[in-house]
Image (cartoon, coloured by chain):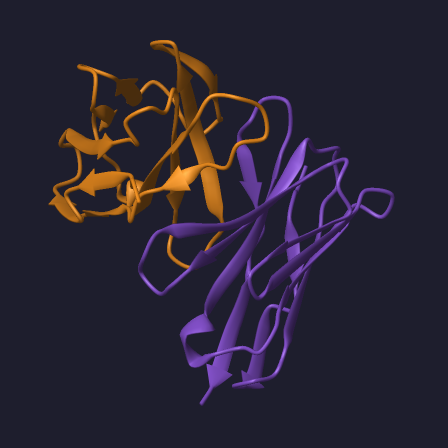
Chain colours: A purple, B orange
Amino acid sequence: SQQGEEDPQALSIQEGENATMNCSYKTSINNLQWYRQNSGRGLVHLILIRSNEREKHSGRLRVTLDTSKKSSSLLITASRAADTASYFCAGARNTDKLIFGTGTRLQVFP
Amino acid sequence: EPEVTQTPSHQVTQMGQEVILRCVPISNHLYFYWYRQILGQKVEFLVSFYNNEISEKSEIFDDQFSVERPDGSNFTLKIRSTKLEDSAMYFCASKGQGGNQPQHFGDGTRLSIL
């Protein structure tokens, strides 16, 4: 089963605007994690939200989780050119392995 | 901030040769993982490792693959007889003790099979 399907696939915005990315998943999870990947680099952990949490903040990041709809969103406020990257959600179940989606490519123009 | 380190950053190998990818997880972490990402595709789980044994492995992780923690710091992935389709970025990750902890990833090893 697939887990972590993001939309949109690509998003282009101007610096200062907010960027919203959505993620849907199909099976139950213990937590959902968001990662950033700069081109050709590793995955940087951004934020983890537990299945019993509905919203979480970290700096300019806001993540929501709706387990009834099996969906999550990542909001980046006041975006910067340095936020340009691919963003992935990944669900973790009891077995702990992460199942990644295809990601959203975010381009922030100065 | 502690980080996961992987070596080499790029490995070029002839098909059929053995390759060993190395990882140094974060020092107090107890759970270790390998993932791979074929160019333009999703990041895929390969194997998880805890308490000196494999916890779970995916269908990709067949008999050609093995993992080892040869000492207290290194975690290795060996591919015995590489195939062209093994070309990918391989990521190591580690996780600390306790529930709902994030996995921390290294920068990856780009493996190119010729």
Residue B93 image position (x, y, % from top left): 37, 35
Splitting the image into 4 quarters, where does residue A16 fall?
A: bottom right
Q: Is residue A41 left or right of residue A109?
A: left
Splitting the image into 4 quarters, where does residue A33 fall?
A: top right
Give the residue drawn at x 54%, y 77%.
Answer: A79
**Number of marks drawn:** 0
> Observer-nearest residue: B12 or B51?
B51
Above or below residue B92? Residue A75 is below
Q: In which quadrant is the C terminus of chain A drawn? A: bottom left
Residue A93 image position (x, y, % from top left): 64, 28
> Observer-nearest residue: B89 or A37?
A37
Residue A73 image position (x, y, % from top left): 70, 58
Q: In which quadrant is the N terminus of chain A drawn? A: top right
Residue A6 image position (x, y, % from top left): 64, 58
> Observer-nearest residue: A53 or A23?
A53
> Observer-nearest residue: B37 or B14?
B37
Above or below residue A27? Residue A7 is below
Give the residue drawn at x 42%, y 52%.
Answer: A44
Give the residue drawn at x 54%, y 55%.
Answer: A88
Q: Is residue B84 left or right of residue A86?
A: left
Give the residue drawn at x 16%, y 32%.
Answer: B19
Q: Is residue A56 left or right of residue A99?
A: right
Q: Which residue, as the protein is rendered here, is positioned at the far right? A: A68
